[in-house]
Structure formats: C-alpha cells, structure tokens
Image (cartoon, helix red, strand yellow):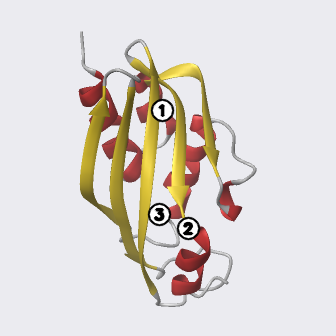
Amino acid sequence: MTSISDTAKEFFEACETGKGWDACKRFCTDDATFAAQSEPLLEINTLAGYVNWMRDLLGPIPDGHYELKSFAVDEERRNVCAFAIFKGTQTGEGGPVPPTGKSVASDYVYVMDFEGDKIRHMTKIWHSGLALQELGWA
C-alpha cells in the first residue's frame, strides 16, 4: 500500500508540472473537491478543474516551476501540506493580457485531505492579488 506521503508527492509533482487531470486522477477520489479563497479560483470546485487550470497556466508562463519549501504529513488528521513558491515569467500567449515579460514568485500552500489512500479534497492557500500584480495582470 502506498503511503499518503508518497501519493501526495506524486500528485504534487504531476499537478505542478502541468500534466493535467489524466496524469493526476489516479491519486484522487473520482469526486475529489477543491477550494481556494483566491479570486481566479473561486469558480473552481473540483480537483480535476484545478489541475487542468494549472496545466493551462503554463501556456502564458511556459517556464513556470515550483520550489518546494516544506512538506508535512499529519497521519492523525489524514492530510498532507506542501508549501512552495511558484516562479515564472509571462512570455507566452494565453494570459489575460499579451505577454508582459514580467515575473512572479508567489508563495502557496496545498492542504490535501485523504480518504483511504486517495486525495478527496484539496485547499489552496494563495494570495492571488499579489501574484497577478507581479505579472502585470491586475
């Protein structure tokens, strides 16, 4: 049996490198939910929707990547937290404005809640307003 730590690490890597839902769904329950108190993500309530949003973000920010700063497992509460910094420069098409050439370094945290050995819900903690300003999108 795979540990929740291993599952969370593999999911995180696939999600953050833009692999999309096809690569991430094996780590999640079929009806996995998503929440974030960040304006660009308010309409997204499924983990599938969020994972594909991340995939699509790499169009306008083709060098987008993460720097993992902390990774913690809480076996008692059956969740895993990953703290990282998303970095990249908008040089590609597909953003809300033409390429700005501006860069972002934005802190965020994922809290992945498990049901058995699969992610059933993920919350993203992220100050999107600052990130959008850095990119010249707001």
Question: What SS does tag 2 mark?
Answer: loop
Residue of label 2: 127
Going by the numbered disc 3, the residue's amino acid type is Leu
Going by the numbered disc 1, the residue's amino acid type is Asp
- Residue plotted at (40% across, 25% down): 27
Q: Which of the two labelled residues, at mark 1 and mark 3, occupies the earlier sequence position?
A: 1
Spot occupied by residue 22 in the image (x, y as percentages of width and height): 48, 32
Going by the numbered disc 2, the residue's amino acid type is His
Mark 3 closeness class: few <14, some 14–19, many ≥20 residues within 10 Å: many
Q: Which mark is residue 22?
A: 1
Question: What SS does tag 1 mark?
Answer: helix
* The image quarter in which residue 48 lies: top right
Q: CA distance from mark 2 to mark 3?
A: 19 Å
Spot occupied by residue 41 in the image (x, y as percentages of width and height): 66, 55
Residue 51 visible? The answer is no
Mark 2 closeness class: few <14, some 14–19, many ≥20 residues within 10 Å: some
**Which of labels 1 and 2 is toward the front?**
2
**Which of labels 2 and 3 is toward the front?**
2
Q: Which mark is residue 1?
A: none
Residue of label 3: 58
